[in-house]
Amino acid sequence: MKFTTFSQDIFNEAINAYHVTDNVDTPISNPYEAGTIEHDLYLKAWIDTVQWHFEDIIRDPNINPVDAVVLKRRIDKSNQDRTDLVERIDSYFLTKYHEVEPQADATINTESPAWAIDRLCILNLKIYHMKEQAQRADASADHRERCAQKLAVLLEQQKDLSQAIDTLLDDIASGCKFMKVYKQMKMYNDKDTNPVLYKQK
């Protein structure tokens, strides 16, 4: 089975599980063993799904400002958790392909496998929610049609991105490509590099 097919099965499992309650405070119940790639893929999709709904909530024009600040902090933490998890998934690929000897003319990709997988996970979320809009009984026929057209584009993008990721993984496995991982080094979350934080010391 291609890695993207395997991944998307797990992504959709997590997305569907979240929408049983459709509540950002629902605790995760990850069915996979900690330390496995399955566990991390499920966690990735759960984090992304919760954050998707955080982003919906914070755009409420009537949100209480105090609640908005609390929610912004939760979004910040979610973004950091997502980044840390993507880097952990890249560690999985580094371990998997560590014995592969790159060919003399091997090239590097513009992004690492896990960051491409990150985009695929977000795409699955877009597809879930666009499909929901295309089938909304309380929406106009025009709205449903516009969303159905967007859904068709997203599904094509999903197919293309999946093929590109699987090709990249095949190329890394064969030595045609090699991977490097650069940590994101987010400065605004670091009390030693964010001037607003370190000047308060």
Image (spheres, grey):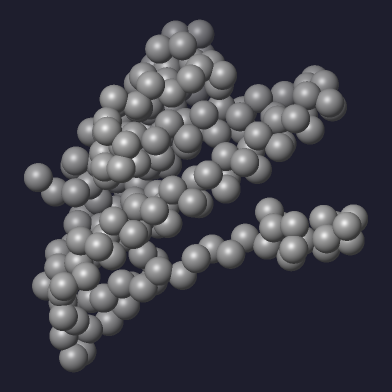
Closer to us: 124 or 1: 1
What is the quadrant of residue 99 in the picture? bottom left
Closer to us: 104 or 130: 104
Is residue 131 visible in the rendered image? The answer is no
Quadrant showing the C terminus: bottom right
Question: Furthest-top residue in view?
Answer: 138
Quadrant showing the N terminus: top left
> Is 86 situated above or below 64?
below
Is residue 109 visible in the rendered image? The answer is yes
Q: Is residue 151 left or right of residue 176?
A: right
Q: How many marks?
A: 0
What is the quadrant of residue 111 in the picture? bottom left
The residue located at (31%, 72%) in the rendering is 179
Q: Is residue 16 left or right of residue 143?
A: left
Question: Furthest-front residue in view?
Answer: 201
The residue located at (23%, 76%) in the rendering is 177
Closer to us: 30 or 144: 30
Question: Furthest-bottom residue in view?
Answer: 104
> Is 92 situated above or below 103?
above
The x, y position of residue 131, in whole percent, is 38, 25
> Is 101 situated above or below 55?
below
The x, y position of residue 2, in whole percent, is 14, 48
Q: Is residue 22 left or right of residue 167?
A: right
The residue located at (40%, 12%) in the rendering is 20
The x, y position of residue 60, in whole percent, is 72, 24
The residue located at (62%, 33%) in the rendering is 55
The x, y position of residue 3, in whole percent, is 19, 49
> Is 54 situated above or below 173?
above
